[in-house]
Image: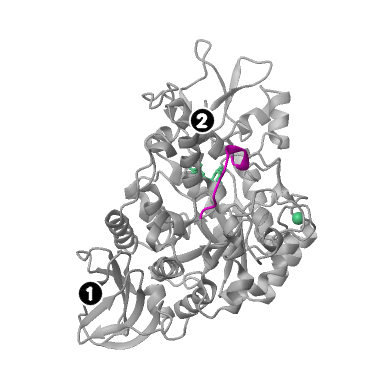
């Protein structure tokens, strides 16, 4: 396999709005990020992914871009962005930005010009279509609920939006539009960005006939991703994108890809794939409800383990995926993937160890490294997220009570990941001296950076050791390129795997069960590299390794 500069890196996702506010407006900003670069360096971070910081009306928290060449004033200025880039480079760190090019904001000048002349050239930057017998052109439901079609004022036409109506989809069939996007992408790469996380990119290929699909909800509409899954040809557009931009700069790209055709994995992440990598969402989709969050199945450990193993075995045939336990669209990983008895520092360290030592590029989401968990939500008014509000209404429409729908949203809401980063036990967790735009998680008194800096056994200091181990001279080769081999799949509660190459055999073994578990080692322990036991020991008699509940060990075997 051709080695690439990003293969052995560890990445960190910053959600700028919630990271650190330095001017008292209750909104995180670039100055805040610059002030924490040393904190991230100490954690061992190589690549920083910034969720969108472009000019935006914030209908979808910046994933609705009104000007691709301007920094939102809420976050700061282009000069501060350039300073952030320079300060990161000084620390040998890379910045990648969020590339949201399936859609833009309805406030973008392209869309404003299209509305002004629905038969003009800019209308063809979007999908303007006549309705059918007084109805929208097709029966698709957007990701955020309601029809994917919105009337174009003063016409008999509609425009297409797979997300909010304020996020009109860009027409990738239009070469002029594509060239405009490529010009913008190369402008950012010329500035010194190391690459991008690419948003919702599978959606850019539409079936231009916009055929109806069988309704799958009480609203009589059909999920828009049914069209995505039915249409071929996204690869052609992705190749055009890559060759016109990323490839020319040896840029690192990580695609946010849901609903991919399984047999297309090598085209997406192989040696000549569309992207350097894509996120592994296989575990996250286990709790996808058929109709929404309200009918999301509960997570079962055995299924979670099998899903991760399957994804690892499949992926290593072709390339790498990016491993996460959470991001800005998901509830906190510690709350989602750990049973309640395991939502403790030991359990959180255990989950983090599994995620970071799998084969692939590890991404840590802000707050994951201090063990942040879901917040406690008291009413729907506390939420800010467009998707959460939609999911609440969907739940109510099928008969859940207000309390039941609130419980669903509390468990699944993206706002669980968007509550402000907790820096201290002081006012607002040290995030802002003003009024935070979203409430601070009440757990901040105990879960914050300042408290954990002082505690050698804290989650934060464990993550520092874990990242350092992954990048250590002795083990970075085997953790980057070593084969993934599952083990002890038949032992209840145990998630274990080898990372192996011609010179090292590392066993990562964790007990997610409530009771202790014993596993028979296949060879002698040569070295204990890491354990989440405070004294760092392991309990092993001859070839029997005893694992307490929530214990994880990293062993070198002969
Ligand atoms: O998410 C794409 C995506 O699939 C989401 O619609 C996901 O299904 C949803 O968040 C579940 O609630 C990307 C961004 O990560 C997300 O924050 C944006 O809202 C979305 O695209 C539109 O840009
Ligand atoms: Ca601010």
- In terms of depth relative to the viewer, which is nearer, 195 or 445? 445
Cβ of mark 2 under 8 Å from ligand 1: the answer is no
* Residue 57 drawn at (x, y percent): 71, 40
Above-or-below relation of 530 to 66: below
Q: Which residue shows up at 57% across the image and 43% down it?
A: 378
Q: Is residue 65 magenta?
A: no
Secondary structure of the residue carrying tag 1 is: strand
Residue 187 quadrant: bottom right
Q: Which residue shows up at 59% across the image and 44% down it?
A: 101
- In terms of depth relative to the viewer, which is nearer, 112 or 150? 150
Mark 2 residue crowding within 10 angstroms, few (<14) / some (14–19) / many (20+): some
Above-or-below relation of 128 to 543: above
Above-or-below relation of 355 to 105: below
The dominant secondary structure in magenta is loop
Q: Which residue is mark 2?
A: 393
Q: Is residue 172 visible?
A: no
* Residue 111 drawn at (x, y percent): 68, 32
In the drawing, does residue 432 fall left or right of residue 304?
right
- In terms of depth relative to the viewer, which is nearer, 514 or 501? 514
Residue 341 quadrant: bottom left
Quarter of the rendering occupied by the N terminus: bottom left
- In terms of depth relative to the viewer, which is nearer, 488 or 100? 488
Span shown in magenta: 374-385
Q: Which residue is mark 1?
A: 518
First in sequence, mark 1 or 2: give its number: 2
In the drawing, does residue 144 fall left or right of residue 28?
left
Q: Which mark is residue 210?
A: none
Q: Is residue 226 visible?
A: yes
């Amino acid at each position: 396999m051709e080695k690439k500069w990003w293969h052995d890196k560890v990445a960190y996702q910053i959600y700028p709005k919630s990271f650190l506010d330095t001017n008292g407006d209750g909104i995180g900003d670039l100055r805040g990020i610059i002030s924490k670069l040393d904190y991230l360096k100490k954690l061992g971070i190589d690549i920083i992914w910034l969720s969108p910081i472009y000019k935006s009306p914030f209908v979808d928290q910046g994933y609705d871009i009104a000007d691709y060449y301007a920094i939102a004033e809420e976050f700061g200025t282009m000069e501060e962005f350039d300073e952030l880039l320079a300060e990161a480079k000084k620390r040998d760190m890379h910045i990648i930005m969020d590339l949201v090019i399936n859609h833009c904001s309805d406030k973008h000048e392209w869309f404003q010009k299209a509305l002004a002349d629905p038969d003009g050239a800019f209308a063809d930057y979007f999908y303007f279509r006549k309705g059918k017998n007084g109805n929208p052109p097709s029966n698709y439901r957007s990701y955020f609920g309601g029809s994917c079609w919105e009337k174009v004022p003063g016409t008999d036409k509609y425009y297409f939006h797979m997300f909010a109506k304020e996020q009109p989809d860009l027409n990738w069939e239009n070469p002029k539009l594509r060239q405009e996007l490529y010009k913008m992408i190369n402008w950012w790469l010329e500035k010194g960005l190391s690459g991008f996380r690419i948003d919702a990119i599978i959606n850019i290929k539409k079936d231009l006939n916009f055929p109806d699909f069988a309704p799958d909800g009480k609203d009589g509409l059909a999920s828009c991703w049914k069209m995505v899954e039915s249409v071929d040809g996204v690869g052609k557009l992705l190749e055009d994108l890559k060759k016109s931009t990323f490839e020319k700069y040896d840029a690192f790209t990580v695609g946010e890809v849901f609903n991919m055709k399984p047999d297309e994995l090598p085209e997406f992440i192989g040696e000549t794939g569309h992207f350097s990598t894509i996120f592994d969402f296989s575990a996250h989709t286990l709790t996808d409800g058929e109709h929404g969050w309200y009918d999301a199945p509960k997570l079962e450990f055995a299924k979670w383990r099998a899903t991760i193993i399957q994804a690892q075995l499949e992926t290593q045939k072709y390339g790498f995926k990016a491993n996460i336990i959470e991001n800005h669209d998901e509830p906190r990983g510690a709350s989602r993937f750990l049973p309640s008895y395991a939502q403790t520092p030991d359990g959180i360290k255990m989950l983090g160890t599994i995620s970071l030592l799998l084969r692939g590029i590890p991404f840590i989401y802000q707050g994951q490294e201090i063990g942040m968990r879901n917040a406690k939500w008291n009413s729907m008014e506390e939420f800010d997220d467009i998707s959460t509000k939609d999911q609440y209404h969907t739940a109510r429409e099928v008969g859940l009570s207000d309390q039941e729908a609130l419980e669903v949203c509390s468990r699944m809401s993206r706002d669980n990941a968007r509550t402000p980063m907790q820096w201290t036990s002081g006012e607002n967790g040290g995030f802002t001296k003003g009024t935070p735009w979203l409430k601070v998680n009440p757990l901040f008194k105990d879960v914050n950076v300042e408290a954990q800096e002082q505690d050698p056994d804290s989650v934060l200091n464990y993550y520092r050791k874990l990242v350092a181990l992954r990048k250590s001279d002795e083990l970075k080769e085997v953790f980057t390129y070593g084969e993934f081999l599952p083990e002890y799949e038949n032992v209840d509660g145990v998630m274990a795997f080898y990372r192996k190459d011609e010179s090292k055999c590392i066993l990562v073994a964790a007990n997610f069960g409530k009771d202790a578990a014993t596993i028979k080692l296949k060879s002698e322990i040569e070295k204990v590299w890491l354990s989440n036991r405070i004294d760092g020991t392991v309990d092993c008699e001859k070839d029997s390794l005893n694992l307490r509940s929530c214990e994880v060990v990293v062993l070198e075997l002969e």
